[in-house]
Amino acid sequence: MRSTLLIPICTSFLIGHAVAGTVLMNASIGRDCYLATLQGSTPDNDRNGLAACNEAVAATYDDRDNHIAAIVNRSDIRLRMMDFQAAVADAEQAIALNPDQPVAHLNRGAGMVGLKRYSDSISSLDKAISLGVQPLHLAYFNRALAKEALHDIGGAYRDYKRSLELNPQFQLAAQELARFRVN
């Protein structure tokens, strides 16, 4: 039996690569919040999106599903702003309201990667994967970042590869995989 050694060519990677997901809201009050998560990340877009999501969180307090969606979407905006602590707090609030909300687990995991709490991130990302989070490739990508930081090089390689298999157009996963050499 031949053993395989995976070696990342460069072990530096950007925590800023952690990526998150959004949830579609049914209520019109949350429309601007949801749409903000779909726009490219710029300081103005993120600031306006955060304001829209803050309004949606406040306005949907009596509508459980839309309230959870607004909180999850706000966590996505906060991740883009690299406010990882607030993003994790939002994700945890959504999880407390609905433990089976897969995107909340994805966003919590991405935020934990940003906070360099890699072991915590893996458990959240495992949960997101088990719940069938969409887009699934983002959960595998974030888990790969965490595994690589924890020196689980084989696990990181497999997760980067799975992320790219799930979305062959996902350039971040392709870039990370390009750093590996299989001996």
Image (cartoon, rainbow, N blue to C red):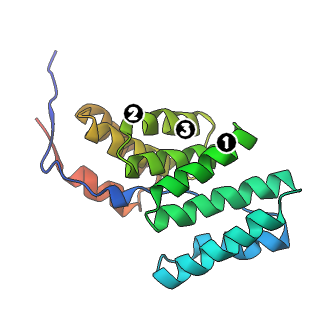
Describe residue 135's horizontal placement relative to residue 148 as left or right: right
Against 28, residue 6 (above or below) is above
Quarter-of-image position of residue 51: bottom right
Kind of element beneath mark 3: helix
Q: Which residue occupies 28% across, 58% down?
A: 14
Crowd class of label 2 (few under 14; some 14 to 19; many from 20; radius 10 Å)? some
Kind of element beneath mark 2: helix
Quarter-of-image position of residue 16: bottom left
- Give x and y (percent) for residue 171: 35, 63
Identify which amino acid the numbered label 3 is placed on: Ile
Question: Is disc 1 in contact with disc 2, using a CB cutoff of under 8 Å?
Answer: no
- Give x and y (percent) for residue 48: 60, 81
Identify which amino acid the numbered label 2 is placed on: Ser
- Give x and y (percent) for residue 155: 31, 33
Quickly name the residue at label 2.
119
Describe residue 85's horizontal placement relative to residue 147 as left or right: right
Crowd class of label 1 (few under 14; some 14 to 19; many from 20; radius 10 Å)? many
Q: CA distance from mark 1 to mark 2?
A: 18 Å
Q: Which residue occupies 41% across, 55% down?
A: 18
Q: CA distance from mark 1 to mark 3?
A: 15 Å
Kind of element beneath mark 1: helix
Quickly name the residue at label 1.
95
Q: Which mark is residue 129?
A: 3
Quarter of the N terminus within the rendering: top left
Of badges 1 and 3, the one in the foreground is 1
